[in-house]
Image (cartoon, coloured by chain):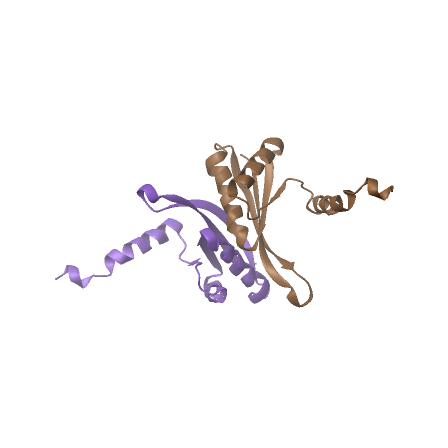
Chain colours: A purple, B brown
Amino acid sequence: MAEEAKPAQPEEQPKEAEVKKTATPNHIYIGKKPLMTYAMSALIQLAQSGEVVLKARGMVISRAVDVSQIIVKRLGQGAYEIKDVKIDTEQVGSGDTVRNVSTIEIVVGKK
Amino acid sequence: MAEEAKPAQPEEQPKEAEVKKTATPNHIYIGKKPLMTYAMSALIQLAQSGEVVLKARGMVISRAVDVSQIIVKRLGQGAYEIKDVKIDTEQVGSGDTVRNVSTIEIVVGKK
């Protein structure tokens, strides 16, 4: 019964590991939602912490670039800029279905 | 008849202007062809000049990242690396149909 009192722990562990690995909790993962959803989340993060990292994989990489441009050119009123852009490869799947997927990390911060 | 002797000139002019504008003739514009087509062109350019710039707009931005990763991780045998990544916005169309398109420039060069 003591184990049942902490049902959330196994789920929390990968999250903690991820935060440790990247050392920044201010990441936004870009997916298929409307661009403005991500742009708004990013602006809130920027107002709070002054920096946000937009991450995307595969086909939605272009959407991450779109979000960064919306923040910098349209919504940010000139207060923010692209600090860094990193591109890399990640392995997705396992065994026979393993494949490489390109990733992007766009760091947006205060000027 | 003298004009007819140079039919290629009007076509060559935008090409020259482009080279002047960017000051580097080693650009590869990524489109809808198979990724390996661009990867091969890029490797030839890298062997000749030691640096290549991969450019893409809109939806094919993710393909430009794919090409850069193929060169760096798979075909380049560890000889090349990502030197710089720039993202920006370009205006496409005119009048009522003008719209913003995100762009990427990935500089790949010798280590």
Foreground residue, A45 or B73?
B73
Q: Is residue A47 above or below residue B87?
A: below
Q: Quadrant of the N terminus of chain A?
A: bottom left
In the rendered image, the residue lying farthest to the right is B1
Foreground residue, A91 or B111?
A91
- The residue under the point 52% across, 43% down is B34
- The residue under the point 52% across, 58% down is A109
- The residue under the point 52% across, 40% down is B36
Q: Where is residue B80 shown, x and y percent of the image?
A: 52, 35
Foreground residue, A63 or A74?
A63
In the rendered image, the residue lying farthest to the front is B1
Q: Is residue A29 above or below residue A88?
A: below
- The residue under the point 54% across, 63% down is A71
How many numbered discs sit on the rendered protein? Answer: 0
Task: Please state if A62 lies on the left or on the right of A78 as rendered.
Answer: left
Task: Please state if A110 lies on the left or on the right of A6 as rendered.
Answer: right
Task: Please state if B94 lies on the left or on the right of B41 as rendered.
Answer: right
Q: Quadrant of the C terminus of chain A?
A: bottom right
Q: Is residue A35 above or below residue B28?
A: below
Foreground residue, A21 or B45?
B45
Q: Where is residue B25 shown, x and y percent of the image?
A: 67, 40
Q: Where is residue A38 shown, x and y percent of the image?
A: 47, 63
Task: Please state if A21 lies on the left or on the right of B53 as rendered.
Answer: left
Q: Where is residue B89 shown, x and y percent of the image?
A: 60, 57
